Image (spheres, rainbow, N blue to C red):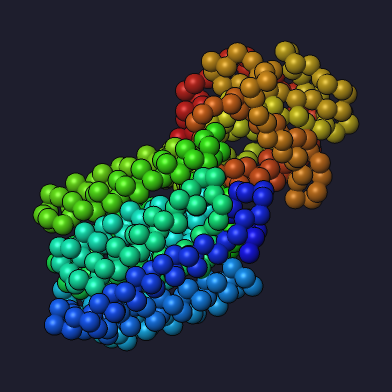
Amino acid sequence: MAATHERHLHSVPLPRLGGVAIFLSFAACMGLSAAWAIRHPNLRPPNFFQTMQTVLVPAALVFALGVWDDLRGVGPYVKFGVQAVAASMLYAGGLRIINIPVLFGNRPLPWFVELMFTVIWVLAITNAFNLIDGLDGLAAGSALFSTMVAFVLAAFHGPVLVEVMTIALAGAILGFLRFNFNPATIFLGDSGSLFIGFLLSALALHGAQKAPTIVAVAIPIVSFGLPILETVLSIIRRLISGRPVFTADREHIHHKLLQHGMSHRQVVIILYGVSAVFAMLSLFLLWPTGSSLGLVMAVLGIGIWIGVQHLGYLEFGEIARVGRRTLDQPQIFVNNLAIRRATEELKVAHDLEQIRHILTAAFGSNDFDGFQLNLRLSPGQIISFADAGLAEDTESSFRWMKPGVKHLNTSSLWTIALSLFSSSQRACGTLMIYRLYSRRDLQLDVNLLTAIFPTALADALDRTQTQPVEVIPMHDQDASLLSAQAG
């Protein structure tokens, strides 16, 4: 069937049932292994056919699900439901997560907790490989590195059947990559990515039961590093941006690398290198010590942090902004209190001179660089401005600039304009607040300026309309007065 999935970047339709070839190749190898075991019963490992049945039957179910999805399309909940059934079959066959030392120590878990974590593990790995299947050869190549790690782990800790399965799977993937690498002539499809992911999750469970505790937990997670990282990033991104978790997008790691100007082949080769690094680091844990585990975790953490920063995800930039704002919170408290204090003082101000001093004190201690108060005057009211003059016979204004600011007539300026309406809905003028563009975030809750503050200022101006007032603004700011008012 032709590929139409929006994550794929091909304009020419290509067949997407490549997973059928991988499944048939793997099944043929398993059939030969079964024939050999029947012919040589004295050399057959214990529980050979039982283990093969435990893995292959649910794997075949997941493969059938993938084929149906490639041909007809299946919703995410149906996919998860069938995969959960297959994972439960693994659990019933004895392949399960017995304990999680990091969370629960070495204590055995209740059966229902074991089942829950087993299902979560299988669903996570199965769909992680499906998620990175967006470029030619990417999912299959990444799976090849993980399969090699599973083989090495089985070679150290057994059983023999896992070694045979990993060799068979690696051979099937390697043969398929010849036709799937860029430019691809066939796609892996859900039949392939789901089958490979499920099989690797099952083999990891089988190998983990024979390995030491730290190896059982760490090696599978690290060896599946790229698909797990992609899955975690995708979930976090979509939760932060408020989008459904199951929606497809073009913000995956390989898409971001393509946006940096790389070709398809370059992106795939780079991500092969990333998968190889994850595989190599996981093999370091075959000889677990406190120092080796700490070194691997440190290298992974630093590498992932640097990589995610270079990818330029907007969602994580927003998290960083929130973090910086948390560190700046003490200064935000100071600036917010200055506006709150000005709001309370305006409630008892009765002349323009008081209002002017309150405003200059409030804005002199925060991140704004100036303001201009435009007044709408009553007939007969006189306000004298030696340096500004009247704009017209019913309106006047005065302007304040922070010391050190030469002028506010510049293109590198942004403005907040507040219309001033009193509690009685009388228009009293406007307040223009100016700030020069800066890399530093505004250390103030702007909601304070748009909620109660404009009404308090308008009411104060309204009270000045009861009698003629003459106000002559000061040319030089009194620093001691500003600090006294702000404090």
Q: Nearer the viewer, residue 154 or 451?
A: 154
Query: For this view, does 365 lie left or right of residue 370?
Result: left
Q: Nearer the viewer, residue 368 or 139?
A: 139
Q: Is residue 260 above or below residue 250?
A: above
Residue 81 at least partly seen? yes
Image quadrant in which you'd find residue 200: bottom left
Q: Position of residue 463 (x, y in %)?
A: 74, 40
Is residue 143 positioned above or below 118 on the image?
above
Q: Is residue 405 above or below residue 257?
A: above
Q: Describe residue 464's horizontal placement relative to residue 43 as left or right.
A: right
Q: Nearer the viewer, residue 192 or 276?
A: 192
Q: Is residue 101 left or right of residue 395?
A: left
Residue 274 in the image: state x and y as whole percent: 36, 45
Query: Quarter-wise, where is residue 202 in the image?
Result: bottom left
Q: Position of residue 50 (x, y in %)?
A: 27, 85
Residue for point 72% across, 38% down? 418
